[in-house]
Image (spheres, rainbow, N blue to C red):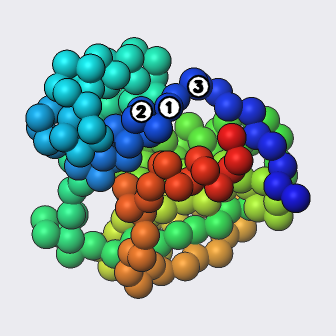
Amino acid sequence: MRRQHQKLAQLDRLDLKIITALLREGRISKVQLSEQVGLSATPCWERIKKLEKSGIIRGYHADIDLSRLVNISYFRVEITLNSYSMAAANRFEKTVKAMPEVIECEAVLGGLDYVLKIAATSTESYREIMENLLDEEGMDFDFRTFPITKPVKSFSDSSVIELIETMDI
């Protein structure tokens, strides 16, 4: 039996088609988008503006392949703060937000506190990043590292419609 989730926004299938199309191709023309979702250009554009105004569409971004700019490797890192407190968590979060090599940081529940994604030019570079983080004043944590060998799926590869339908909303 699936748990029922509260729907936060009143969207119909056309809105979800627009979101899915923009997620996959943020630079799609208004004409192409309206054809893809089955609306004329003006109603499609009005829906996009409504989705932007409501904050559902937060922005439009380029998908940059950093490996074409620099030799780069990615590492997932599980972090467990040794003496968890709000002050320690805030200090950790403030520190990683200031580190350009930390390209993602998520607070999680369970046996660890954070999952990071770090970009580095080599394993040696990664080691230096982690040593510098550990050397920061007040930093006391354990970590496990997982080098990323290849991306398999990203959020932009997902169908918002299928995702929402699996949630029985």
Q: Residue at x 30, y 46 (%)?
A: 21
The kind of residue tagged 1 is: Asp
Q: Residue furthest bottom?
A: 149
Q: At which x and y percent is residue 66? A: 21, 63
SS under mark 1: loop
CA distance for labels 3 and 2: 11 Å
Residue 113, image quadrant = bottom right
The kind of residue tagged 2 is: Asp
**Which residue is denoted by mark 1 in the rendering?**
12
Give the camera-side residue of 17 and 49: 17
Determine whether label 2 and label 1 are within 8 Å by CB. yes
Determine whether label 3 and label 2 are within 8 Å by CB. no
CA distance for labels 1 and 3: 10 Å
Q: Kindly tell me whether residue 82 is visible in this rendering.
A: no
Q: Residue at x 57, y 24 (%)?
A: 10
Q: At which x and y percent is residue 155? A: 44, 56
Q: At which x and y percent is residue 89? A: 71, 42
Number of other residues with Cα within 10 Å of mark 1, as a class: few under 14, some 14 to 19, many 20 or more: few
CA distance for labels 2 and 1: 5 Å
Give the camera-side residue of 169 and 153: 169
Q: Residue furthest right?
A: 1
Query: In the shown orientation, is residue 169 left or right of residue 42?
Result: right
**Which residue is denoted by mark 2 in the rendering?**
15
Q: Residue at x 17, y 26 (%)?
A: 41
Number of other residues with Cα within 10 Å of mark 2, as a class: few under 14, some 14 to 19, many 20 or more: some
